[in-house]
Amino acid sequence: MVAFTDKGEILVGQVAKRQAITNPENTIYSVKRLIGRKFNSDEVVHAMKRLPYKVVSGPNGDAYVEIRGKQYSPAEISAKILMKLKQAAEDYLGEKVTDAVITVPAYFNDAQRQDTKNAGAIAGLNVLRIINEPTAASLAYGLDSKKEEKIAVYDLGGGTFDISILEIGEGVFEVKSTNGDTYLGGDDFDTALIDFIVASYLQESGIDLKKDKMALQRLKEAAEKAKIELSTVMETEVNLPFITADASGPKHLS
């Protein structure tokens, strides 16, 4: 998550998330769904329905984001995150970090991979390789033996749910097949919860919270919290006092 404040500051990570409620139109998230894609592509059109910030057509018809009248490519936004990670690594290691290997979903096309590499370059990194996420996961689990085998890797992330079939032999990883849903991830679980809460509140109060960007951002945070809680319990509660207001005064959600 990357945020642009009215003071000209650029915030990354948790500090950006903390101010998202009061600055939703200038807080960028899920940019991975835009990188390397055209503005008029089905994926971008679908994503725009849910994003509080402005997505515009940039050079060559690519999807860009517009913040305070200035356009940024998804690679430039991604670079802000990579810069933060680079700085964190340097602080921990006590030395400069110049090289990086960046992982991407196995289904990423050439344009998406190149834009990811461009993001690394903008961040001041020499990107040695772009590798597939299932390959990285396999390496992390120590599945790099010389024994020949086929493995299935499931990847449930913030924006996608994928399965990849890998063939391993002599330390070489080959993705034989990959498939998945680019709109079935943590963000989409949040969206499903938001839709349920909005519909319930509309039925109870007659107020459509989707028309209130600040209320929606509060709902997004509450939905994410509820989702995390539902990983370990069977039910949870969402309580948001002063979620909105009408002519009769402030309204609460519980």
Image (cartoon, grey):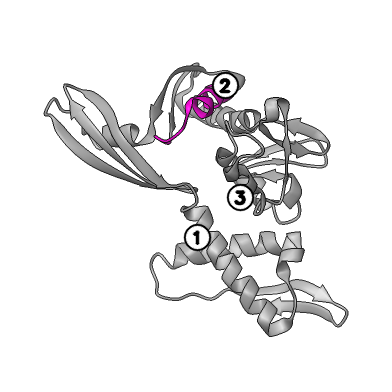
* Quadrant occupied by the N terminus: top right
Image: magenta residue range: 105-120
Query: Mark 1 vs mark 3: which is more N-terminal?
Result: 3
Vertical placement of residue 65 versus 208, above or below: above
Prevailing secondary structure of the magenta residues: helix
Left or right, 246 with reference to 200: right
Pointers 2 and 3 in contact (C-beta within 8 Å): no
Q: Using the rendered view, name the quadrant where residue 166 is placed.
A: top left
Query: Mark 1 vs mark 2: which is more N-terminal?
Result: 2
Instruction: Please give the residue where the numbered disc 2 appears in the rendered image.
Output: 118
Left or right, 168 with reference to 248: left
- The amino acid type, in three-letter code, at marker 1 is Phe
Question: Which x, y percent locates residue 242?
Answer: 74, 73
Question: Which x, y percent locates residue 227?
Answer: 48, 64
The numbered dot on residue 197 is none
* Quadrant occupied by the C terminus: bottom right
Residue depicted at 62% across the width and 45% down the height:
29
Mark 3, secondary structure of its residue: helix
**Does residue 140 appear in the picture of this structure?**
no
Instruction: Please give the residue where the numbered disc 3 appears in the rendered image.
Output: 46
